[in-house]
Each structure stands twice: as C-alpha cells, then as structure tokens.
Amino acid sequence: MSAITQIIAPRRRDLGGFEVARVLPYMKQRSVGPFVFFDHLGPAVFAPGQGIDVRPHPHIGLATVTYLFEGDFMHRDSLGSIQLIRPGDMNWMTAGRGIVHSERTTPEARAAGHRIHGIQSWVALPKSAEMAEPKFTHHPASILPTVNKPGVRLRVIAGSAFGVTSPVEVLAPTIYLDVALEAGGELAIPAEHKERAIYTVDSPIKIDGEDLPALQMAVLAEGKAVTLSAAAPARVMVLGGDPLDAPRQMWWNFVSSSDAEMERAKADWARAPEEGWTGRFKMPPGEQELIPLPEL
C-alpha cells in the first residue's frame, strides 16, 4: 500500500508584483493537521527600488507562520510589534480574536535589490483559543533546535520531533520541520503525528521509493512511518499534527468555526476606519494605508 494518499501541485497566485505557489487549501485537502494555508513564496528577484509591500490587513482565529530561506521582511502589527524577520527565524503571530499586520521589504534591501524565498502558512487555532487575546512572538534561528543525522540536517521549527521540541508555543500537537537532505541522504519520518505532509522546496525526492517531484506536496497515510531519500541535495518541509477539532471556514484572511464570528469580523474591518481604529482591529505603528475588505 502506498504511503502517499494525495499529491498536490501548487496553483500560481499573483499577489501584486510577485507570485506565490499556493498549496493549501486544496479542493480535496483543506488542511493537514492544524495547517490550513501554505504558500511557497519565490524565489523572487527584485531590482533596486522594488520590493514587497503587504499593506495592513486583519486576521482572526489563526496563527500566521512566516519562515524565510532568503531575504528579510519587516513585520509590524497592531500590538505594537516591529520585527525584522531573517532566514531561519520563526515568527508566530496568534491572531485570536483579531490582529492587524503588515509585511514590507526593508528600505536597505529595497535600495540594493534583493531575493526573497520562503514559506508562509496559517495554523488554525483550537476552538477554545479562537477568541484568545492576540499575541506575537519572534524566535531567532539560533534558538530553534536542530538535529543532525548522516546525510541530513533538520530544524524543528514548531512542535516536536526526533526527541526535541521547539520553543514556539503551539496550542495543539504539531510537527513543522525544515529538512536538508544531502545527495544520498535518507530520513525516516515516524508515524507519531496523525496527519503529515511533505513539501519539496527545490528538488525531487522519493518517499518509500515513490517519486515526489519538486514543488509538490505529498499527504501521507495515517499511522505509517516513511523514509525520505534524495539522489541530489534537496530541501523539504514536513508539516502536520492532530486533525482539526471542528470544521473551519476560510474567507479572505479570516479562519473560524463560527458563521456568526466570521460575519462580525467582516463588519468590524469594514467599520474600523470610520470608528478611528478603536475596536479590535487597530493599525500597526507607522502605517496609514490598508487592504480593504474584498467585495462580498
């Protein structure tokens, strides 16, 4: 029996001057563990004077997870956080009842020209935490645990694996790994997490001898340990955890198990500028423009 239950080929999405490869959500695979959204950003090259400007926008019911391989972003949020995100760092922003944030190319990178490459994902919060107070935590690469095996080096970005646990505070059993396989390297992925997927960032690999092309996600069968192997150097992301504790809706930047809460969030963001940003959605420091609510 195959260890792979589904292979997902990303769809290209233009976000205004740059493209992403969107993997999750997918029509036949809405989530993997708590992960409900997974974008592969870049690699993209920006000439001097160009950059990324993701204007302030709101979230509810989820945690955003930004992880870069190359380049950097400046994060600002409505809690007052201002944080530069560098390769290997882990930014975990818990939206809870509501948060607003922006991500922009730094002035230094914009002036010089730069490359950007990374993964942006969303994790649905457990129902009990969907309306929690928002929170932002930054974890530099230096404090995230690494595991070295023959032909393999991996970083535990969030959750637990291979006997180590990331300092990132997750609210449900989670696995999220950045794995570098050398040519001929192999890594056994245990079956301890109920839902798991493998995403190939740059090169093809094999899963129990089955081919997984580059830039594709393989969803793994529950309860089955698998072995990843690479003929050439390859970088892969391993993600998953416990299944969601209830169905989730996703609309624009909102994730919720409640129809009523989804509608309240839409109305609150539409009213926020008129009310002077005094409600749950506030502007990040130094920001004045926003992404408006899409047409319903």
Image (cartoon, rainbow, N blue to C red):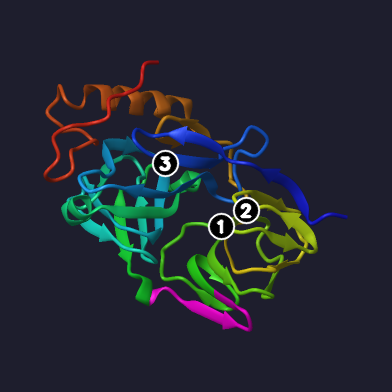
The image shows residue 241 at horizontal and vertical percentages of 60, 57
- At x 47%, y 26%, the residue is 259
Report whether residue 222 is seen.
no
Specify the label residue 214 is tagged with: 2
Which one is in front in this view, the residue at disc 3 or the one at disc 1? 1
Going from N to C along the chain, the mark reached first, 3 or 1, is 3
SS state under label 1: loop
The picture quadrant where one finds residue 288 is top left
**Left or right position of 274 against 295:** left
Q: As shown in the figure, which amino acid type bears the numbered disc 3?
A: Gly
Quadrant, the C terminus: top left
Q: Is residue 172 above or below residue 145?
A: above
**Left or right position of 261 against 111:** right
Going from N to C along the chain, the mark reached first, 3 or 2, is 3
Q: As shown in the figure, which amino acid type bears the numbered disc 2?
A: Ala
Pointer 1 residue = 202
Disc 1 to disc 2, C-alpha distance: 6 Å
Q: Is residue 32 above or below residue 152?
A: above
- At x 52%, y 57%, the residue is 172
In contact (CB < 8 Å): disc 1 and disc 2:
yes
